[in-house]
Amino acid sequence: MEAPMKQTRFYLLIGTVLLMGIVFMASAFGAIPIQLNDMMNGVKNGIMGTVQDNLTQQVFFSLRLPRIILCGITGGALAVSGLVMQALTRNPIVEAGLTGTSAGAAFGASLVFVFAPLFPQFVQLVSINTLLPMMAFVGALLATIIVYKAASVQGVTSAITLLLVGVAVNALAFSGVGFLSYIARDPQARSITFWNLGGFSGANWMQVGISSIVVLTTIIYFFRNAIALDLLQLGEKDAGYLGLSVNKVRRNLLIANTILVATLTAWCGVIAFVGLTIPHIMRRFTSGKHQPLIGLCFIAGACLMLLADLAARTIISPAEVPVGILTALVGAPIFIIIIRKQYFS
Amino acid sequence: MVLELKNIYLKTKTGYRLQDISLSLVSGKHHVIMGPNGAGKSSLLDVVSGSLIPSSGIVLLEGIDIKTYDVKNLSTRRAILSQQIHLSFPMKVIDVINLGCYPHEGRSKKQDEIAVSNIIQLLNIQHLENRWYQTLSGGEAQKVQLARAMVQLDANATPTNKLLLLDEPIAHLDPQYQQEILFQINQLVEKGITVVSVLHDINLALQFGDQLHFMKESKLLHSQQIDEPFTNELFNQIFSIKVQIERQPVTGRPYIMYQ
């Protein structure tokens, strides 16, 4: 009985070592290469408040480090969020985006891009850097609430209606984004496109702080409720027979998941395929229980996102490729290979 | 008396699914509910399990209204084995069986392990423990689910006053597994568990049931012990079939031949 657990611990250890290696690589490479001692001094001087004396150290502490941390926790959290959504809906082709969260965020952000220039006084009052994530968050939350309300019949939400309504609300939100892009002027339309492709170029310590709190809280919550995700694999009815308050648990997990995805999407835009692909790969390394899966998915998601972001900012350096393009470019073929192996062999 | 139903009515938009059902189930017996499609068998099982609240009437589990039970407490007293369960993602058999430990709060990990290992031995499925659930045959998967339900009831340690509900658990299985699973279930009945099953196969019901309850058109028409004589008219009235009733030479139990 203990063998699979030992194996999982081994994978967790390997994953953590790998993640540390990738974090170091991501710290060292970029538009400006950074040495280890500059990283150490950058952190030290950054905390002391004297980092501005050295450009390399300043780049590391003010730009690269927050970007790496935000990128890592976003990748990890999106992977875990995909895992939770797949378990809740018992559907392998689901990620958080499917319940309207990402599409709603995209619509909220697009509204800001198109209409903010029309109200310069208001934008002066509330900076665009605050307004954009705020509207994305509100959009994400609203779209998800609409999906759940529309999918519930007499207080009961079945997984299949949730997914179908999610598809419809996604289409609606993206048609809104399409319309806004159409009426937008060129630079605004370009901003909408960039935002929808995701990226971490605007990362700062405030975003890291807020995201860390939300990610840590929700991941701990998921971890404590991992047994519920295991039980739900039996189906809603049989999980209920085992004493699980299915509706309550599912509602709470979905709320936590929505807040998690909405917060992260608000900073970094729509990033596809991490939540879909990583859980499928990681399931191969465990006995199927969700508690170890949450840890493995977080580490793997962080690794993938950091590598994608590293590639995004080095391939055509000093310019950047939006990270969402790379996650889809890498994630989609891997996903197809896994699905073919899993379902056609 | 582990379970009592008093004047149960269940009304839906399309009409009555259960009408005036009163039933007392003696503990430590295998009760079989029989009847044609749409007779209300599964609805009755849903009401007995506490997952459907009747429009009127009361269900008493050990003399207490089933509605008043805490959901986890209820889960340690009654378990349901449904038709084949498909898991959406790969899972090891041992982890599926372990799910039965969920309602047993406050038990140590060691106690959980002992409970699980005892049930695995009791059902003789040690060889399946480390397999992936998805790779099991239908019969093997049902044995694993039976083990999971037994762990849920802690049936090995405290079998009395425990209720196992079977909703056509052997439908679509090979005859070998049908016999094996029902035989194992009856071994549990001998230990003191009360079983209520819905079975479609009349001869399997007659072979394994202790008390048979016949339903038709959402009503309970007739109940009788297996050792009381059965009449051709009963089967004609319930199932609209003509049968000849014989007795098995070894067990003395009745079986039917279709005419």
Image (cartoon, rainbow, N blue to C red):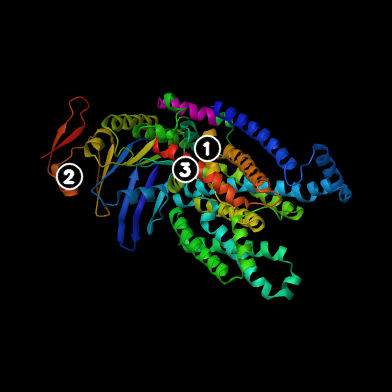
User: Does dot 2 land on a helix, a strand or a loop?
Assistant: helix
**Mark drawn on residue A283:** 1
Numbered disc 1: what chain? A
In the image, residue A41 sits, relative to residue A11, either above or below, namely: below
Numbered disc 2: what chain? B
Which residue sits at x=76%, y=45%? A32
- The image position of residue B128, as x and y in percent, is 43, 27
- Give the Cα separation between the discs numbered 3 and 1: 16 Å
Residue indicated by mark 3: A336
Q: Nearer the viewer, residue B219 or A68?
A: A68
Would you say A52 lies left or right of A333 here? right
**Mark sitting earlier along the chain (3/1):** 1
Magenta span = B112-125
Picture quadrant of residue B147: top left
Residue indicated by mark 2: B235
- Give the Cα separation between the discs numbered 1 and 2: 51 Å
Mark closer to the observer (1, 2): 1
- Give the Cα separation between the discs numbered 3 and 2: 55 Å
Looking at the rendered structure, the kind of residue marked 1 is: Arg
Q: Nearer the viewer, residue A84 or B194?
A: A84
The answer as to whether the residues below labels 3 and 1 share one chain is yes
User: Does dot 3 land on a helix, a strand or a loop?
Assistant: helix
Looking at the rendered structure, the kind of residue marked 3 is: Ile
